[in-house]
Amino acid sequence: MDERAVAPVVAAMLLLAALVMFLSVYNAVVVPSFKEQAEVEHLYAVEESFLAFGSDMTTAAALKQDLHLSKRIPLGGGDTIFDPVRSGGSLRFSEDPGGPLASVTVGGTTYYCNLTNFSYTPISNFWRDQGYIWQYGYTNVTGAGGLQTPLDYADMDKVREAAERSGFAGSLIEIEHDGRYDNNDNYNCTDVRIWVVTFEPDKKHYFASGNGVGTLSLNAAVEDIRITPSPNTIEIAVNTGLPVPLNTSLWAKCNETFHAMNETYANVENCTFSPKEDLVTLTFTDSEHVPERVTLRLVRVVVSAR
């Protein structure tokens, strides 16, 4: 038997074994680390888009005009040159389970100031199951088991402190008024304009899922509602049951405005309030001394995910 052919065969087998071991280590260690890094970058892009669209929501409430805003969000990530497989994700809008933030009753009809939240949930993530949810004007980072923690604040106590002076909540209802002197030199309220901002998910496009690029959109439209005949009373109630006290700044603002009207105009009989119920009511003198015009401007902000 010629043993000279054995050495090349053994050498080839050793090289093959080394190559297999290298590829195994590469696939077990290097490729996952690359995919984790790519997934981290993907989640960072989701976070930036979430914060930007949350800012768009507060902008729509502040401007109170017809407008359209949108943000693109990468639903999936983690793909690399050596492994193009991508994770996925889903976007969802939903109504706030705590109910409306406030209601305005004028002319026998009640108009609600509704809130909404939107969330991103990862699917088959290559790093960790980190998602995001925007609610009550701030963003939470979400994790497995339903855990949540604020993104921009140290803890929920800081979130509540910020909510008590929230400009977002205070912008959801605005009250404008004008007056003039009558023949008896009484300064009466003649024109009341009430802005009510309400958010609602698009019933057909409130959910999107996949591993491509999703889009969060909002469409704000202003509807002028002339209240006829002019009512004797205007009532605003603020929800005290929300987990974040957005009602504090909104209640204080509406209460302050109504009391200023009570002190300014002769045809405003009284302004009653109940801090326990967060209810404030403005009453005009009688049916002959109501404002000439009362207009409710409903700013309807419809949000969607595609």
Image (spheres, rainbow, N blue to C red):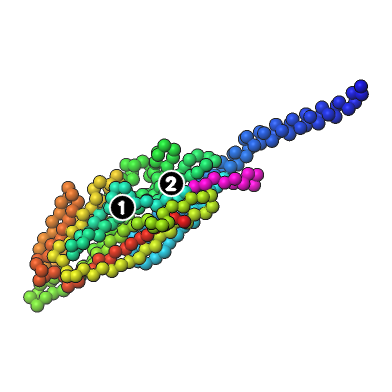
Q: Amino acid at mark 1?
A: Ser
Q: Is residue 142 above or below residue 103?
A: above
Q: Locate the N terminus by quadrant.
A: top right
For the residues marked 2 and 1, what is the alpha-carbon distance in whole angstroms?
21 Å
Q: Position of residue 244 (x, y in %)?
A: 30, 46
Give the magenta part as a residue range: 79-89
Q: Residues within 10 Å of mark 2 (few under 14, many from 20)?
A: many
Tally of numbered discs: 2
Q: Amino acid at mark 2?
A: Tyr
Depth check: 185 or 306 in front? 306
Which residue is outermost to the bottom?
A: 183
Viewer can see residue 165: no
Residue at x 29% of width, y 44% of height: 243
Depth check: 157 or 66 in front? 66
Instruction: Identify the disc placed on residue 132.
Output: 2
Which residue is outermost to the right?
A: 2
Residue at x 60% of width, y 38% of height: 32
Which residue is outermost to the top?
A: 1
Image-quadrant location for residue 12 = top right
Q: Is residue 137 above or below residue 269?
A: above
Q: Position of residue 124 (x, y in %)?
A: 52, 42
Q: Position of residue 134 (x, y in %)?
A: 39, 49
